[in-house]
């Protein structure tokens, strides 16, 4: 088959074709759930699935690529093809996506000489190696080779960042040189000069917007007089940041804008169809004067919620799509008011019924962070405090140690910036917190002699704007009053995954009484699930806990924070099992309760309304 761009329409084997796409990021969804989410996209009436490709997930270490398990992009695309659907692939190299560092590997920036997203030899050489690694996955899966891929996007909203046509030309050539033959697109917001600055005549321009469809399409047509109109990011919701409200958009209003778009003959990619979750330490951040880390949930108020269940928006969008294209019949469980779960699994087994209710889990084993440090650290010494990047740590936590003698106390100051949050303790006593978003750089220390410990958390690398690629950790010299502290002992904490030795220490700890928890500390507990409903998605509620990280059966769910908006962490069904299951929590402050809950329903937080 052939896919092409005509004067007015996309052409599939020469016939007019409308792209009805929805975004599913394979790297935000447990791989055992990919088929379920793709099938539900088809049931809403979509004929295409779109995904970014997260370069930094695949090449976490320079020169070593991983396309296995949850990063098996080839398998994801094969599942799209198995549903008889097409695919739009957006390999970047920059993707934004509210993903850490906008998808760019942190190691690109360690020597400070690489010029990103422009015509710079070191950057383009690294991109070339990345594209070469993608070639065996993408090239044979193009539509003209019998695969699902019909469009490939070059760069991402480049007009909001820069205007370097030579860079775009070289990037386009690099995509062609690996064997990609399908049409190439660009995407920008249809406003100001973004469409013109972010594209080339050889790239088909598409728009990104979530409202005022008629106006946006008119601006897109002005920038591109011929060819099919397409909104390749139809924003049907929005992402959440810690400390803000949970974003929602009315289903009826979003459906109306979608109707206007389709009535004008436009193609669409719904961003997001299913948002998923920023598992582990993968969330991004924004910094436009104030640092704002993005929450763990990427529910996005999408048609398919974080647990893969259809929302009101799913049914409203499906009704709109049915006016312009045939839609499949919904199984009874997918009808409004149903459970939202498909009737069978891939192998034909009957789906398990919904669980009866929530399960309380007492975390009865507690080990202070210090007790697990031998299993999760690898210490090195440094004259000055190194950044995460200099240590080869992409994310998570790094512990900095220094011996001090302060008979009269003093003021600890970080010369340049804290990135992003520091728990300060001295001689075993917690002192306080330095917060990047508060622009904190100084804290008073009491009189003491002993070990100064700075537990630094990267809360998410900036994914948009000029602060992409900045190093994490303690930036600049650390002083107490006028004295620069030297001779540091430093280690990243191995947390994703937790080493087996660390888990063994937790399991070997004696059960303890009491309800409160003083951090930093790990706490663990077990719970049982019956075979019926054991592997359905659930949510971990940590009421009474303040801030930290949680795992279920060794799978890192991500960060929690009492400031919200979200009050639960998504637990993918495939992570759970019939019989005994285990919860582990790292609480960095304190908890008023050591009982958590495996819940059936999420709590994503308050909305503006």
Image: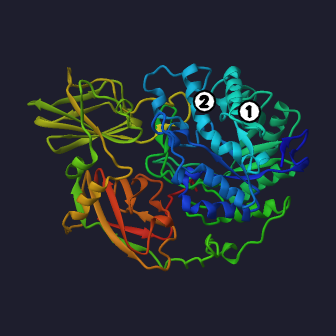
Residue 554 shows in the view: yes
Which residue lies at the image location 55% right of the left edge and 28% below the top edge?
126
Above/below status of 588 relative to 568: above
Which residue lies at the image location 44% right of the left edge and 50% below the top edge?
280
Q: Please give left or right for residue 415 compared with residue 222 in the image.
A: left
Give the alpha-carbon distance from disc 1 to disc 2, as whole Å.
31 Å
Residue 579's image quarter? bottom left
Instruction: Between residue 476 and residue 432, name the one nearer to us.
Output: 476
Q: How is the image coloured?
A: rainbow
Q: For the residue labelled by badge 1, is the local secondary structure a helix, a strand or a loop?
A: loop
Residue 210 shows in the view: no
Residue 161's image quarter? top right
Q: Please give left or right for residue 429 compared with residue 150 in the image.
A: left
Q: Please give left or right for residue 256 compared with residue 73 in the image.
A: right
Above/below status of 504 relative to 57: below
Q: Earlier along the polypeptide chain: callout 1 or callout 2?
A: 2
* Residue 373 coordinates in the image, percent (x, y): 23, 47
Q: Please give left or right for residue 339 compared with residue 467 in the image.
A: right
Q: Which mark is residue 368?
A: none
Q: For the residue labelled by badge 2, is the local secondary structure a helix, a strand or a loop?
A: helix
* Residue 446 coordinates in the image, percent (x, y): 15, 36
* Residue 581 coordinates in the image, percent (x, y): 37, 69
Which residue lies at the image location 62% right of the left edge and 64% below the top edge?
36
Quadrant of the drawing holding the C terminus = bottom right
Q: How many marks?
A: 2
Disc number lying in front (1 or 2): 2
Tell me if mark 1 has few (under 14), some (14-19) or many (20+) residues whose alpha carbon lies within 10 angstroms of its own.
Answer: some
* Residue 472 coordinates in the image, percent (x, y): 39, 33
The residue carrying mark 2 is 128
Which residue lies at the image location 26% right of the left edge and 50% below the top edge?
520
Q: Which mark is residue 191?
A: 1
């Amino acid at each position: 088959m052939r896919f092409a761009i005509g004067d007015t329409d996309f052409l599939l084997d020469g016939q007019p074709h409308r792209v009805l796409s929805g975004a599913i990021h394979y790297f935000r969804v447990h791989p055992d759930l990919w088929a379920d989410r793709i099938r539900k996209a088809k049931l809403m009436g979509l004929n295409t699935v779109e995904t970014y490709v997260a370069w930094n997930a695949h090449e976490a270490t320079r020169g070593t690529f991983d396309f296995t398990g949850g990063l098996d992009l080839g398998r994801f695309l094969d599942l799209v093809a198995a549903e008889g659907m097409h695919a739009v692939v957006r390999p970047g190299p920059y993707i934004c996506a509210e993903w850490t560092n906008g998808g760019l590997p942190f190691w690109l920036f360690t020597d400070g000489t690489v010029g990103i997203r422009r015509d710079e030899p070191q950057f383009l050489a690294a991109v070339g190696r990345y594209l070469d690694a993608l070639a065996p996955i993408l090239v044979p899966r193009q539509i003209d080779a019998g695969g699902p891929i019909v469009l490939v996007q070059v760069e991402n909203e480049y007009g909001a960042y820069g205007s370097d046509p030579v860079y775009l030309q070289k990037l386009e050539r690099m995509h062609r040189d690996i064997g990609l033959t399908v049409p190439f697109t660009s995407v920008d917001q249809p406003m100001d000069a973004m469409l013109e600055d972010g594209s080339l005549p050889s790239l088909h321009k598409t728009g990104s917007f979530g409202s005022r469809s008629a106006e946006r399409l008119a601006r897109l047509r002005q920038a591109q007089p011929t060819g099919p109109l397409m909104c390749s990011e139809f924003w049907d919701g929005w992402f959440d940041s810690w400390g803000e409200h949970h974003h929602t958009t009315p289903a009826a209003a979003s459906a109306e804008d979608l109707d206007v778009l389709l009535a004008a003959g436009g193609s669409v990619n719904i961003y997001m169809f299913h948002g998923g979750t920023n598992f582990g330490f993968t969330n991004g951040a924004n910094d436009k004067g104030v640092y704002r880390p993005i929450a763990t949930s990427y529910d996005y108020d999408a048609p398919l919620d974080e647990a893969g269940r259809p929302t009101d928006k799913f049914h409203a969008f499906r009704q709109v799509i049915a006016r312009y294209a045939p839609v499949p019949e919904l199984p009874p469980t997918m009808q409004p008011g149903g459970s939202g779960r498909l009737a069978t699994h891939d192998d034909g087994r009957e789906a398990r019924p919904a669980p009866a209710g929530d399960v309380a889990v007492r975390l009865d084993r507690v080990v202070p962070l210090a007790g697990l440090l031998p299993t999760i650290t690898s210490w090195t010494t440094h004259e000055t405090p190194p950044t995460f990047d200099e240590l080869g740590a992409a994310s998570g936590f790094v512990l900095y140690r220094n011996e001090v003698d302060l008979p009269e106390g003093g003021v600890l100051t970080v010369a340049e910036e804290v990135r992003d949050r520091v728990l300060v303790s001295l001689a075993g006593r917690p002192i306080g917190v330095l917060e990047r978003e508060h622009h904190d750089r100084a804290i008073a220390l009491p009189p003491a002699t002993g070990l100064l410990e700075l537990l630094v958390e990267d809360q998410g690398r900036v994914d948009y704007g000029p602060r992409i690629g900045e190093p994490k950790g303690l930036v600049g010299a650390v002083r107490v009053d006028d004295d620069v502290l030297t001779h540091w002992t430093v280690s990243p904490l191995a947390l994703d995954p937790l080493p087996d030795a660390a888990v063994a220490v937790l399991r070997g700890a004696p059960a303890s009484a009491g309800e409160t928890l003083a951090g930093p500390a790990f706490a663990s507990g077990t719970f049982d699930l019956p075979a019926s409903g054991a592997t359905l998605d659930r949510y971990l509620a940590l009421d009474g806990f303040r801030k930290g990280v949680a795992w279920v059966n060794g799978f890192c769910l991500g960060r929690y924070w009492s400031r919200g908006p979200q009050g639960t962490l998504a637990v993918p069904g495939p992570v759970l099992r019939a019989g005994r299951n285990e919860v582990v929590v790292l609480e960095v402050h304190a908890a008023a309760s050591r009982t958590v809950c495996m819940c059936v329903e999420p709590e994503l937080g308050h909305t503006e309304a």
